[in-house]
Image: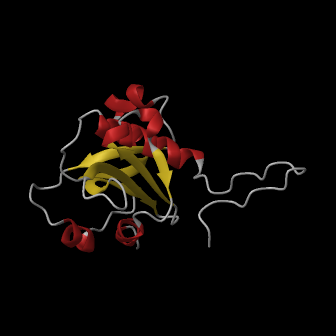
């Protein structure tokens, strides 16, 4: 199955984009990715629980004012012990019922060009929900700006699958 919609004939109206994530997921993913990006490069892996904003405001009234214009979901960063093996951690991770989704920010290196030995830093923000919605955002260190962050399809399916499994009842 191709990652992009086929082009419409020249005399037809453009096809509607069907590969875009739901607005509420894109909002929480973008906010979380920008939060991580504000701390620069060279970070350890970071894990976030995604909770309903209304539930968080009810549980933490002192935060209610700060959350008033927030989206449907709010990311809450979780402590990830230094030196944690990510695969092992994800294999044992299980979220309580109040957590609607989770996100993982990881930095990796990739070949700058297919035929090039140089590598460049890339940050992935991988998100999964209990409804099996998944989203991955990609930021390249070489193009480090909020408007250059891309939505990626099938880039981190293994991580998205592990996150989704951690949400199963």
Q: Is residue 27 left or right of residue 63?
A: right
Q: Where is residue 168 drawn, in percent x and y? A: 41, 72
Instruction: Judge whether residue 76 can be spotted in this image.
Output: yes
Q: Where is residue 123 drawn, in percent x and y? A: 32, 49
| Quarter assignment of residue 87 | bottom left
Instruction: Judge whether residue 99 can be spotted in this image.
Output: no
Residue under the image location 26 percent in, 68 percent down: 90
The quadrant of the picture occupied by the N terminus is bottom right
Residue under the image location 9 percent in, 59 percent down: 83
| Quarter assignment of residue 157 | bottom left
| Quarter assignment of residue 41 | top left
Q: Is residue 168 left or right of residue 93?
A: right
Residue under the image location 62 percent in, 57 percent down: 19
Q: Nearer the viewer, residue 117 or 168?
A: 117
Q: Where is residue 13 drawn, in percent x and y? A: 85, 48
Residue under the image location 63 percent in, 60 percent down: 4
Depicted 93 relative to depicted 43: above or below: below
Depicted 16 relative to depicted 60: above or below: below
Q: Nearer the viewer, residue 20 or 131?
A: 20
Q: How is the image coloured?
A: secondary structure
């Amino acid at each position: 199955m191709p990652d992009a919609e086929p082009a419409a004939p020249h005399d037809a109206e453009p096809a509607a984009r069907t590969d875009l994530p739901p607005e509420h997921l894109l909002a929480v993913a973008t906010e979380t990715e920008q939060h991580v990006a504000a701390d620069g490069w060279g970070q350890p892996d970071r894990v976030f629980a995604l909770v309903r904003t209304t539930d968080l405001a009810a549980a933490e009234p002192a935060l209610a004012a700060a959350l008033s214009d927030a989206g449907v979901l709010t990311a809450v960063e979780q402590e990830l012990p230094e030196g944690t093996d990510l695969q092992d951690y994800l294999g044992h991770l299980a979220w309580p019922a109040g957590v609607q989704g989770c996100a993982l920010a990881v930095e990796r290196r990739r070949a700058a060009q297919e035929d090039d030995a140089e590598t460049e830093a890339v940050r992935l923000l991988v998100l999964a929900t209990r409804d099996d919605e998944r989203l991955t955002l990609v930021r390249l260190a070489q193009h480090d700006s909020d408007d250059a962050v891309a939505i990626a399809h099938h880039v981190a399916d293994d991580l998205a699958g592990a996150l989704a499994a951690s949400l199963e009842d």
